Image: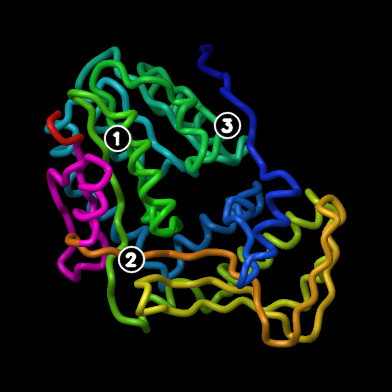
């Protein structure tokens, strides 16, 4: 594949699938619709807010442990899923570049335009390293990465696994296990259970970037599906669901609303105060993660966390590998 190419095409849900999500109780929208180019840019702003601890904490962990992780796994290929701007990937690639020529990097993300820019920047920073860019949705397009070959490290940072419910995370981890062979590894960023105040603030920053990010999803649905959401009719809300160990992100109707999604042929009526759930963000402990890994045939090889136990890096291998 030429260095400046992007494999695959962006994947979007069909109108029928979107209709099925909106018909759920409560109504929902797949989180992939957050990440058009504007949404990806807004998310980058969120990661720089005071309230959003995951990015700076995970960066600190990578600054401390990236060299050790690369020494321990000695990968020929680093493949990051949901890479965004690849800001954190660079800490791993800095360490990888010290290993000599012949190493490769693959970046995988749903937003083709945003990914193309990120891949281009990596090629300039690491001219000795072959960089591939693959557009796809990590919940269903991981097969586009192909077989690992010699010593591949899959990387899934930012606590994004939290966006998957129990059934979805089980399927995802099983697919990771299927892509992982002898000598391969999986580096996972894991957001940890903590106080309600810290969690809810992280998803509702004072500058309003998270609210804008959430509302932007409706604009995407209007453009892609001919929906008629009036963005001023909706209010962002983030709440900690302690029983399910997850933050839930909502768009609540500020008045009675009627919405028509033209491409789906779907009408929806919500009363004032009723909402659409746009995202979940599940939080883990080391024990809950070990249990889910075991079901998928994976094992936790190393657990790295910060002094406040806000966030963790988990180095994972396949059972028996």
Q: Work out whether residue 213 or residue 319 is closer to the camera in this orientation and state it.
A: 319
Specify the segment rendered in magenta: 288-317
Residue 85 visible? The answer is no
Q: Residue at x 26, y 20 (%)?
A: 76
Q: Work out whether residue 250 or residue 168 is closer to the camera in this orientation and state it.
A: 168
Specify whether residue 299 is painted magenta: yes
**Closer to the camera: disc 3 or disc 2?**
2
Does the CB distance between marks 2 and 1 fall below 8 Å? no
Residue 156 is left or right of residue 64, and the answer is: right
Q: Residue at x 84, y 74 (%)?
A: 258
Residue 12 is left or right of residue 247, and the answer is: right
What residue would you read off at disc 3? 116
Cα–Cα span, label 2 and label 1: 21 Å
What residue would you read off at disc 2? 283
At mark 2, the secondary structure is loop
Q: Quadrant of the C terminus?
A: top left
What residue would you read off at disc 1? 177
Cα–Cα span, label 1 and label 3: 28 Å
């Amino acid at each position: 594949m030429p260095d400046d190419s992007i494999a695959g095409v962006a994947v979007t849900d069909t109108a029928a699938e979107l209709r099925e999500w909106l018909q759920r109780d409560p109504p929902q929208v797949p989180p992939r619709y957050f990440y058009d180019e504007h949404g990806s840019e807004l998310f980058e702003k969120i990661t720089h807010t005071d309230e959003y601890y995951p990015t700076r904490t995970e960066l600190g962990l990578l600054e401390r442990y990236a060299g050790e992780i690369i020494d321990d796994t000695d990968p020929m290929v680093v493949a990051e899923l949901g890479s965004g701007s690849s800001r954190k990937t660079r800490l791993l690639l800095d360490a990888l570049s010290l290993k000599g020529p012949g190493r490769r990097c693959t970046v995988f993300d749903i937003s083709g335009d945003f990914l193309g820019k990120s891949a281009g920047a990596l090629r300039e920073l690491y001219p000795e390293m072959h960089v591939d860019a693959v557009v796809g949705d990590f919940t269903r397009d991981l097969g586009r990465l192909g077989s690992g070959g010699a010593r591949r490290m899959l990387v899934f940072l930012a606590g994004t696994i939290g966006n998957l419910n129990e059934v979805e995370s089980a399927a995802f981890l099983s697919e990771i296990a299927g892509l992982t062979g002898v000598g391969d590894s999986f580096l996972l960023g894991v957001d940890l259970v903590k106080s309600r105040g810290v969690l809810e603030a992280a998803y509702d920053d004072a500058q309003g970037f998270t609210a804008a990010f959430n509302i932007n999803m409706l604009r995407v649905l209007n453009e892609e599906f001919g929906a008629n959401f009036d963005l001023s009719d909706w209010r962002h809300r983030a709440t900690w669901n302690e029983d399910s160990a997850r933050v839930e992100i909502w768009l609540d109707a500020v008045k009675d609303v009627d919405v028509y999604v033209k491409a789906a042929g779907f009408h929806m009526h919500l009363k004032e105060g009723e909402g659409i759930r746009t995202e979940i963000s599940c939080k883990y402990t080391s024990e809950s993660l070990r249990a889910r890994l075991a079901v998928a045939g994976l094992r936790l090889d190393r657990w790295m966390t910060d002094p406040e136990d806000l966030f963790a890096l988990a180095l994972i291998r396949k059972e028996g590998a």
